[in-house]
Image (spheres, rainbow, N blue to C red):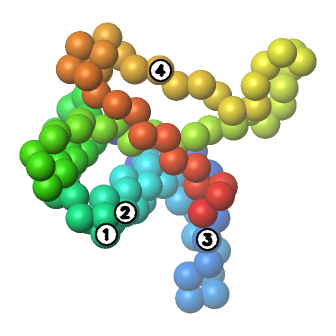
Amino acid sequence: MGSRYGKSKLITKSDNKSIKLTTSIKGSIGEYQEVINFLRKGYYVAKAVDPQCPFDLVVVDKKGKIVLLDVKSNTYRKKIKKPHYSKKIGRGRTELQKKLNIKLLMIDHESQ
């Protein structure tokens, strides 16, 4: 996880005041939204406490199937310099995440 003093990306309204949220806080909000989503669907969920952990969530279904997830927010290019570039910036798993069979869970704050 990065510094909480990084770039501001999301603006929200709270008590009629605009609040700029850092990308780190925006990521934390996304992780907890996914925790809530899985809990509502009846899964058991645990959150990693080590900031260097290669996964964010451990999700277990009622039959005991365990899935390790790294929650990532979709990011988009502001300007597309070449016509073949996608506006959405692609994300990939690290070698360790591949070895441990960690899945990426991409979330999109723009559609929420």
Where is residue 92 drawn, in percent x and y? Answer: 47, 20
Q: CA distance from mark 1 to mark 2?
A: 5 Å
Secondary structure beneath dot 2 equals helix
Residue with the mark numbered 2:
37
Name which of mark 3 and mark 1 comes first in the sequence: 3
Q: Callout 1 environment at 10 Å: few (<14), some (14 to 19), or many (20+)? A: few
Q: Quadrant of residue 55?
A: top left
Residue with the mark numbered 4:
92
Q: Amino acid at mark 1?
A: Arg
Q: Which mark is on residue 40?
A: 1
Where is residue 63 drawn, in percent x and y? Answer: 12, 49
Q: CA distance from mark 3 to mark 1?
A: 25 Å
Secondary structure beneath dot 1 equals helix
Q: Is residue 42 above or below residue 70?
A: below
Q: CA distance from mark 3 to mark 2?
A: 21 Å
Where is residue 100 drawn, in percent x and y? Answer: 21, 20
Task: Answer with left or right where residue 90 lies relative to residue 24.
Answer: right
Residue with the mark numbered 3:
12
Task: Answer with left or right where residue 28 lies relative to residue 57.
Answer: right
Query: Which residue is rendered at x = 56% and y = 88% of the image?
Result: 15
Front disc: 3 or 1: 1
Secondary structure beneath dot 3 equals strand
Q: Amino acid at mark 4?
A: Gly
Query: Which residue is rendered at x = 31% and y = 69% of the image?
Result: 40
Residue furthest right as drawn = 83
Q: Callout 3 environment at 10 Å: few (<14), some (14 to 19), or many (20+)? A: few
Query: Which residue is rendered at x = 64% and y = 28% of the image?
Result: 89
Name which of mark 3 and mark 2 comes first in the sequence: 3
Name which of mark 1 and mark 4 comes first in the sequence: 1
